[in-house]
Image (cartoon, grey):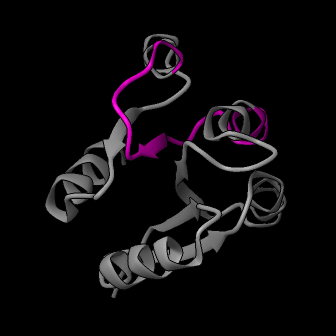
């Protein structure tokens, strides 16, 4: 049996973390973080993380600010930004500069996200 890939999901809302874990635990090992600083610590301590998904709107560090810092730690892995809002100029720039692999919408479409993760790996 092969080991499942690991996803780090960063979101400041506990319910979103729970829903993400419930929906993706069959295919992935899911690690959650409540903010960008916690996410950075987890990323440093877990070299086995294969994908990072971050909420956009979080206190202290936005999703983009978190990903900018996280990419310095693990530049080789794909980063996804999950947001309930439309693509902003800031998100568009993150896509165009290859900071993020892609932008995903809340409420999330599980099949669409699984396909995006699979393609990224």
What residue do we see at 66% from left, 33% from top?
A: 75
Vertical comparison of 109 with 19: above or below: above
Q: Is residue 12 left or right of residue 26?
A: right
Q: Is residue 29 left or right of residue 85?
A: right
Q: Which residues are magenta?
A: 69-90
What residue do we see at 41% from left, 73% from top?
A: 20
Vertical comparison of 113 with 18: above or below: above
Quadrant for residue 62, please give it.
top right
Q: x and y percent of residue 95 in the render?
A: 44, 20
Front one among 84 and 104: 84
What residue do we see at 71% from left, 60% from top?
A: 47
Verify whether residue 89 appears in magenta: yes
Q: x and y percent of residue 45 in the render?
A: 82, 65
Residue placed farthest to the left in the image?
111
Q: x and y percent of residue 61 in the render?
A: 77, 42
Look at the image and tell me whether residue 80 can be seen: yes
Verify whether residue 82 appears in magenta: yes
What residue do we see at 24% from left, 59% from top?
A: 114
Q: x and y percent of residue 18 in the render?
A: 48, 82
> What is the count of numbered marks?
0
């Amino acid at each position: 049996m092969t080991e499942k890939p690991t996803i780090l999901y960063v979101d400041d809302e506990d319910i979103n973390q729970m829903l993400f874990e419930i929906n993706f635990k069959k295919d992935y090992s899911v690690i959650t973080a409540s903010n960008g600083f916690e996410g950075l610590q987890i990323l440093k301590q877990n070299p086995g993380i294969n994908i990072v998904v971050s909420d956009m709107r979080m206190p202290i560090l936005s999703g983009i600010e978190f990903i900018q810092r996280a990419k310095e730690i693990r530049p080789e892995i794909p980063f996804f930004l999950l947001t309930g809002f439309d693509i902003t100029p800031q998100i568009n720039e993150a896509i165009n500069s290859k900071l993020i692999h892609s932008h995903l919408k809340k409420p999330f479409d599980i099949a669409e996200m699984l396909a995006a993760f699979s393609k990224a790996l």
